[in-house]
Amino acid sequence: MDPEGSHKNIVVADPDPIIGPGQTLTSVTDKISSIVLTPGMTKGWLGGFTVGVMLLLLLNVVITYLFAFGVGIWGINVPVAWAFAITNFVWWIGIGHAGTLISAFLLLMHQRWRTSINRFAEAMTIFAVMCAGMFPLLHMGRPWMFYYMMPYPNPMWLWPQFRSPLVWDVFAVSTYFTVSLLFWFVGLIPDLATLRDKAKNRVSQVVYGALAMGWRGSAVHWSRYEFASLLLAGIATPLVVSVHTVVSFDFTIAIVPGWHSTIFPPYFVAGAIYSGFAMVLTLAIPLRKYYHLEDLVTIRHLDIMAKVTLATGMIVAYAYIFEAFMSFYSASQYEKFMLMNRMTGPYKVVYWGLITCNLIIPQALWARKIRRSPVALFLIALVINVGMWLERFVIIAISLHRDFIPGKWGMYYPTRWDWATLAGSFGLFFVLFYLFIRFLPMISMAEVRTLVHQTDEEKLHV
Amino acid sequence: MPQIFHRSANYLSRASIIGAVVLIGLLGFALWEITMSPWYTDQYVAKQQPVPFSHRHHAGELGIDCRYCHTSVEKSSFAGIPPTQTCMTCHSQIWTNAEMLEPVRASYRTDQSLSWTRVNSLPDFVYFDHSIHVAKGVGCTTCHGPIAEMPLTYREGTLYMSWCLDCHRQPEKYVRPKSQVFNPFYRVPANQLELGRQLVKEYKIQSLQHCSTCHR
């Protein structure tokens, strides 16, 4: 490449690599597959899984009680008929967006650093969408009638109300789940074949073998695999934007001040990616530490993710500022009141908590030192997770509790069942996630091997 | 290393792709068939009654008007089940010793109503009014079927909402002249659509399809 050829064949170490030095094709495969194939459970895994299962059991109790007594067990009532459950729904579905962005959008953009984080980010997406999808169903009042939302042939000749954003939600979320699951599974196939070949016991061989669907790694297989991945990435990329846009329609279609706003779709999408990247960081930092994956999920990765977080955080900040500006500029007393009520009303602690968590503290990410410090980044990611949850609560519950007529103002206080449902959804998420890291490769072996190959080639040509 | 799967796994996996589609299709078809079957809907299932009352005999062969027994059909939401006294207007004079009619006479003596088994029963969340349907040219047999040919009464419709909507969406297919409403032998004329459209206009029939029309 160098015209003078003076540096030919000199291996120059990248000072900030996307893959640790000295990794070979074998070492990558062994490192990742051994986590799955080593028999038994580590204490850390078992501990975390136990906590997850206990929270999941709590969710079980909540759902049983909810089905028996109805949504009245939550603190919701007129005027605040939507509160924790919908907040949780929007929060969880937002989390998922980072996974899709990493796996699909960055694939199309040829961002190679995605390879070592895309697998568990996609898993996070799928589990987060499952947690999210649960909430509207639980909120229905008669959850066993959920299939009324689907257009299926029925003897009532009844069709869903296609003018309702709640029906759009059903389509957006189910499409999102299906495409994410397919994308994840297609990506897993070569790795499942690796596990099949490396597995020692018969059960693992058969299970991984069946899931690998006869993958032999031939050139035809790889060519079709690449093509399928690209196609699915092409389908999934618009979903990054569309799903949370549709979710935001749940609010914008209504005329409640604080909901009825044209800024919501882009604002929700940015917020979704913001919270999603925070969640990816929240999961990645302990994982790389516990399973010693620092060479694969490098400081460079954390740095890049922190930058994306900061960038989307700034978009969200812009939206907050413009939301406030538009309220004053609107010349509508209800819009102005809505904002003043957020800032100085009975829930002002929540609003200022949101501003602190989402706007002020993340500004620390401007510092390179903080972006490259796993501990600091982990703490900031946690803060953003909390902040994004508060944001949805502010939008949903605070807008509802005081709207047009003072006579119908009211307060919302979460009950212990509200908190238990939220905690229980974490149980579902973590149980699934712990099972995932135990039984499936949390980093794509095939893609990281490609990356090792490519970086080796490049070193030779510097 | 020995092979994990037998050669047949190749065929099985390919067959499973088609199999899954076929299975889901069949499952859907079976569910639909069950939903529409008389076993599930009670359609065409004649019910046992305390007295084997025959509409074929009374309304068909004898030609008694529907309103002789179902007196409130033109005025009320409920067509009305006749009291024992209505039966006795005739049966105090004819078939006075018939074994079959003993429950009727017993009811008359003791003043205890006959406990008929309901054949057409709409759920409580549906508002239905006989009087407006009768007044707008919906014949008895349009919903209740060939009642003058039923030895024991059975349900003609599924009573599914689609069954109601069939007519509410296209009343011109079913409506008849007001003079023919209580005629149990009315036959749908060849020019039903033409006549229907004319009657819909004449009787000012609205095609009411709002949820709250029936679910009030």
Image: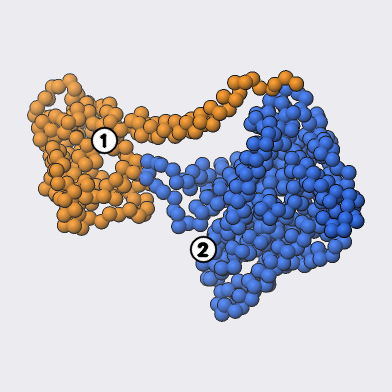
Chain colours: A blue, B orange
Of A287 and B196, nearer the camera is: A287
Residues marked 1 and 2, same chain? no
Task: Describe the element under mark 2 as helix, strand or loop.
Answer: loop
Q: Position of residue B155 (x, y in %)?
A: 27, 34
Q: Position of residue B198 (x, y in %)?
A: 16, 54
Of B101 and B138, nearer the camera is: B138
Q: Amino acid at mark 2?
A: Ile
Q: Quadrant of residue A380?
A: bottom right
Specify whether residue B77 is in view.
no
Residue in the image at 22% along x and 28% along y? B152
Residue in the image at 13% along x and 45% along y? B180
- Residue holding disc 1: B156
Q: How many marks?
A: 2
Q: Position of residue A402 (x, y in %)?
A: 58, 68
Q: Is residue B25 left or right of residue A362?
A: left
- Residue holding disc 2: A253
Task: Find the residue positioned furthest to the front.
Answer: A4
Residue in the image at 37% along x and 41% along y? A155
